[in-house]
Image (cartoon, rainbow, N blue to C red):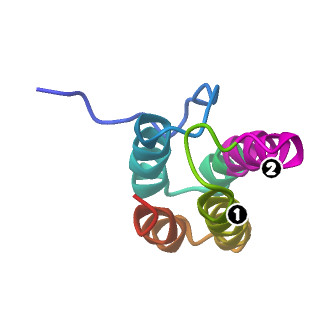
Amino acid sequence: MTAAPNPAHIIAVDDYTPATLRNLIAHLDASSSFEHCIYREAELDAVWRLLDIALQRGDASQLSVPQLEALRDATHAAHDLVAAEQPAAAAARLRRML
C-alpha cells in the first residue's frame, strides 16, 4: 500500500514525465492550506521552466512541440489556480494532460 502524500513536503521536480506529474497531482489533491499552495506553486514553476527550456531548445524527444506547448499552458493554468488557493482545480487541470 502506498503512503498518502504529505502536502507539507516539497517534492523534487527533475522532469515533466507522467510520473512526476502524477506525484504533483497527488500532492495538489492533498493540499489544504495556504502554505501547501506555496509549495505547489514552486513545484509548478519548476515544471513550467523545464518545459520552457525544452521548447527553447526545440527538444521534442519525449513529446512533440504542440504537446510541450499544451503541457506548458496547462502547467501555467494550474499554477494560477493554486495561486487562487484552488489546488483541487489545479490537479484536475493537470490530470487532463495525462
Look at label 2 and name its amino acid. Leu
Residue 12 position within the rendered picture, expressed as x and y whole percent measured from the top left: 61, 25
Location of residue 75 by image quarter: bottom right
Residue depicted at x 68% and y 57%:
65
Residue depicted at x 41% and y 63%:
95
Location of residue 82 by image quarter: bottom right
Q: Element at badge 2?
A: helix
Q: Which residue is mark 1?
A: 69
**Is 52 colored magenta in this rendering?**
yes
Look at label 1 and name its amino acid. Glu
Q: Are marks 2 and 1 in contact (CB under 8 Å)?
A: yes
Q: Earlier in the sequence, mark 2 or mark 1?
A: 2
Q: Magenta residues: mostly which secondary structure?
A: helix
Chain part drawn in magenta = 41-59
Q: Nearer the viewer, residue 89 or 15?
A: 15
What numbered label is drawn on residue 25?
none
| Left or right position of 95 against 59 | left
Q: Which residue is mark 2?
A: 55
**Is 70 colored magenta in this rendering?**
no
Location of residue 70 by image quarter: bottom right
Give neighbour class at mark 2: few <14, some 14-19, many 20+ (Cα, 10 Å): some
Residue 42 position within the rendered picture, expressed as x and y whole percent measured from the top left: 75, 43
Q: Nearer the viewer, residue 9 or 43?
A: 43
Residue 9 position within the rendered picture, expressed as x and y whole percent measured from the top left: 56, 29
User: What quarter of the picture does the N terminus occupy?
Assistant: top left
Residue depicted at x 48% and y 45%:
21
